[in-house]
Amino acid sequence: MNHSLVTSSKPPSPSKAAANMVTKSMAANLKDKGIAVVSVAPGMVVSNFAGQGVEFMVKIGAKPVEQATKGILETIDGLTVESTGNFIMVPSSGEPPKPFPW
């Protein structure tokens, strides 16, 4: 494990590991058919999901829904069979989406 990528003291959840494995498996199975499969993390997005309120989310660096959506659409538009199986992160900084090792 590359500890420089760990941002929390908690290990990755089994459900995240399972989702990543499903992406890899589907990508391998569909690549020969010309179908690209990726997982996309939109980053921290402003919402009231955590019950903290929109102002709090903005204060801690969450990005607007429009920015997250733009990054997801850029990811979809840029998919190729060569990018299949990747985990794509949409940076909160507004930079273009990029593969994130996991």
Image (tube, rainbow, N blue to C red):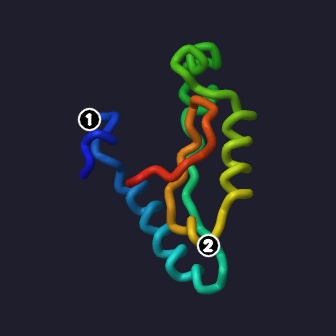
According to the picture, the residue beneath numbered tag 1 turns out to be 9
Q: Say what amino acid the circle numbered 2 marks.
A: Val
| Callout 2 secondary element | helix
Question: Residue 57: where, in percent of width, then height?
Answer: 57, 21
Question: Residue 22: where, in percent of width, then height?
Answer: 48, 69
Question: Residue 61: where, in percent of width, then height?
Answer: 55, 22
| Callout 1 secondary element | loop
Task: Report crowding for label 2: few under 14, some 14 to 19, many 20 or more residues within 10 A (C-alpha).
Answer: some
According to the picture, the residue beneath numbered tag 2 turns out to be 81
Q: Find residue 10 and report its image quarter.
A: top left
Residue 80 or 29: which is nearer the viewer? 80
Residue 12 or 71: which is nearer the viewer? 71
- Count how many numbered circles sit on residues in the image: 2
Q: Which mark is residue 78?
A: none
At a point 40% along the width and 53% down the height, the residue shown is 101
Q: Quadrant of the C terminus?
A: bottom left
Question: Is residue 90 depicted above or below 79 in this figure?
Answer: above
At a point 61% along the width and 72% down the height, the residue shown is 81
Image position of 50 (left or right of 11): right
At a point 65% along the width and 76% down the height, the residue shown is 35
Q: Say what amino acid the circle numbered 1 marks.
A: Ser
Question: Residue 15: where, in percent of width, then height?
Answer: 41, 56
At a point 34% along the width and 48% down the height, the residue shown is 12
Between the residue at mark 2 and the residue at mark 1, the CA separation in whole angstroms equals 35 Å
Image position of 100 (left or right of 54): left
Q: Which comes sooner in the sequence, label 2 or label 1?
A: 1
